[in-house]
């Protein structure tokens, strides 16, 4: 978890400096205001991803599953920002990426569905931490 968090934070810092420099915004101010919410989101995502090590699947299947889930979250999140469809807005209450977007923008997370989703992510990470196999199935392939 530590290496993933360090790498993610490094990408975050580079992204902040590149974008704020390009738009003429104070880089240090943006970094200090966004660093804590970003770290909370990354810790939650990385923590919940431990659950994958519990599943009896191969590396290829795990990789494909993660790609499908992340792409679906991204599509729903972007579509929810652009379209005013009630069903999509409701589905995005369960979308971790959409919840993270609200959290990063300072709007807070107040919907019961979103709080339930965050709780589920934390619980999945707990299951992954307790039942994690040191050598998952894909390490033998």
Image: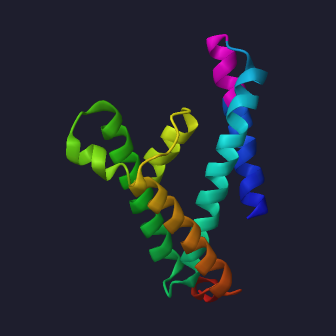
Residue 139 placement, left or right of 78? right
Q: Is residue 132 magenta?
A: no
Instruction: Give x and y (percent) for residue 69.
Output: 41, 61
Rendered position, 66 above or below 29:
below
Q: Is residue 22 magenta?
A: yes
Residue at left offset 51%, top offset 84%: 55
Colouring scheme, one of rainbow, by chain, secondary structure, one colour: rainbow
Rendered position, 124 above or below 100:
below
Q: Pick the residue in front: 11 or 29.
A: 29
Residue 31 placement, left or right of 113? right
Instruction: Give x and y (percent) for residue 133.
Output: 66, 87
Rendered position, 47 above or below 14:
below
Residue 86 placement, left or right of 130? left
Residue at left offset 26%, top offset 46%: 88
Instruction: Give x and y (percent) for residue 124.
Output: 55, 73
Q: What stretch is highlighted in magenta?
A: 16-24
Please identify the dominant SS of the magenta region: helix
């Amino acid at each position: 978890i530590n290496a993933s968090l360090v790498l993610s934070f490094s990408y975050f810092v580079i992204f902040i400096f590149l974008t704020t420099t390009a738009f003429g915004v104070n880089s240090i101010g943006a970094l200090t205001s966004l660093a804590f919410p970003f770290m909370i989101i990354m810790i939650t995502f990385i923590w919940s991803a431990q659950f994958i090590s519990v599943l009896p699947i191969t590396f290829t299947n795990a990789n494909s599953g993660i790609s499908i889930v992340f792409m679906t979250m991204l599509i729903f999140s972007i579509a929810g920002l652009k379209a005013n469809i009630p069903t999509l807005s409701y589905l995005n209450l369960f979308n971790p990426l959409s919840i993270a977007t609200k959290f990063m923008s300072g709007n807070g997370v107040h919907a019961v569905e979103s709080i339930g989703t965050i709780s589920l992510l934390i619980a999945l990470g707990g299951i992954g931490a307790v039942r994690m196999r040191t050598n998952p199935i894909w390490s033998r392939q």
